[in-house]
Image: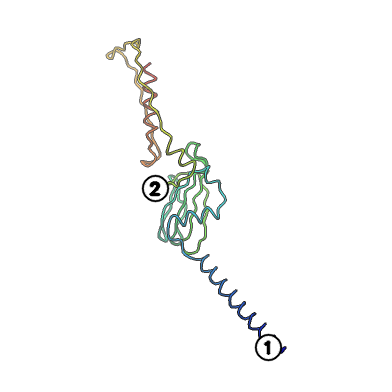
């Protein structure tokens, strides 16, 4: 009788051990499953990197192959050590150019991060996809307005032949991808204001 109880206990312990081993392998397989889409990469980033994502502009580029060079407008950031995704995080989107930003590489297979801090936007800005955040939505919804042309007939008459005053107005972004319409509108507003 004692031997029967003993064998039942050993049998149950064996079943429990096998169950625990199988469960641990299943969890390991789930944790190590490859990240195959931008959506999965974004979810993984947000679960593992503590940033207030609604206060930043967040962009993703990828999937990228191993050995892809990542550049800012001023310098080299990294070469991707294996296939994965690169995130560009503008930490201060209301600031002008050249302020703290992060580049984060996420390995597709290993689920590991490489984080680089710099102060420049990406050279290939147009390759990055803006992720929907509160700040991103605010930026996309903001519309720059052009000042109305004044209907004032009291403007001084300028004799074009004798007037030697000239102004060159220039504005623009650091690349074609960031050459926003607001820059043209700023110039238009300056031009209209100077003619009042």
Q: Residues within 10 Å of mark 2 (few under 14, many from 20)?
A: some
Give percent across and percent down for residue 7: 66, 86
Q: Quadrant of the C terminus?
A: top left
Q: Position of residue 142 (x, y in %)?
A: 43, 34
Q: Residue at x 51, y 45 (%)?
A: 101
Q: Quadrant of the N terminus?
A: bottom right
The residue drawn where x is 42% and y is 39% is 140
User: Which corner quadrant of the image does residue 63 belong to?
Assistant: bottom left
**84 over 170 or under it: above or below:** below
Name of the residue lying farthest toward the right: 2
Residue 124 is marked as 2
Residue 155 placement: quadrant: top left
In the rendered structure, the answer to whether residue 107 lies left or right of residue 159 reads right
Q: Where residue 193 sits: x, y (%)?
A: 39, 20
Asked if residue 167 lies left or right of residue 99, the reply is left
Which image quadrant for residue 19? bottom right
Give the residue at the far left of this rendering: 161
| Observer-nearest of 12 and 156 | 12
Is residue 7 positioned above or below 48 on the image?
Answer: below
Q: Residue at 50% x, 64% y: name it.
A: 110
| Mark toward the start of the polypeptide (2 vs 1) | 1
What is the count of numbered marks? 2
Q: What's the image's color scheme?
A: rainbow
Q: Give me the disc on residue 4.
A: 1
For the residue labelled by badge 1, is the local secondary structure a helix, a strand or a loop? helix
Query: As displayed, is residue 55 above or below residue 22?
Result: above
From the top left corner, tell me how far across and down residue 106 is, in percent: 48, 57
Q: Is residue 165 left or right of residue 47?
A: left
Q: Residues within 10 Å of mark 1 (few under 14, many from 20)?
A: few
Q: Which one is in front in this view, the residue at disc 2 or the one at disc 1?
A: 1
Real-space CA distance between mark 2 and mark 1, rounded to the nearest whole angstrom: 72 Å
């Amino acid at each position: 009788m004692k031997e029967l109880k003993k064998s039942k206990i050993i049998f149950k312990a064996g079943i429990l051990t096998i169950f625990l081993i199988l469960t641990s392998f299943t969890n390991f397989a789930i944790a190590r499953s490859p990240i195959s889409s931008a959506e999965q990469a974004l979810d993984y980033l947000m679960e593992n990197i503590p940033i207030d994502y609604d206060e930043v502009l967040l962009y993703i580029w990828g999937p990228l192959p191993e050995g892809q060079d990542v550049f800012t407008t001023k310098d080299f950031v990294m070469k991707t050590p294996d296939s994965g995704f690169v995130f560009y995080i503008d930490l201060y989107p209301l600031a002008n150019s050249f302020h703290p930003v992060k580049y984060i590489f996420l390995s597709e297979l290993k689920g590991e991060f490489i984080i680089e801090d710099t102060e420049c936007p990406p050279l290939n800005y147009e390759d990055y996809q803006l992720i929907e955040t509160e700040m991103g939505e605010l930026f996309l919804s903001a519309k720059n307005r052009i000042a109305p042309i004044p209907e004032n007939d009291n403007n001084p008459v300028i004799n074009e032949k004798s007037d030697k005053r000239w102004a060159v107005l220039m504005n623009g972004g650091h690349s074609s991808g960031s050459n926003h319409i607001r820059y043209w509108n700023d110039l238009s507003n300056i031009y209209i204001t100077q003619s009042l």
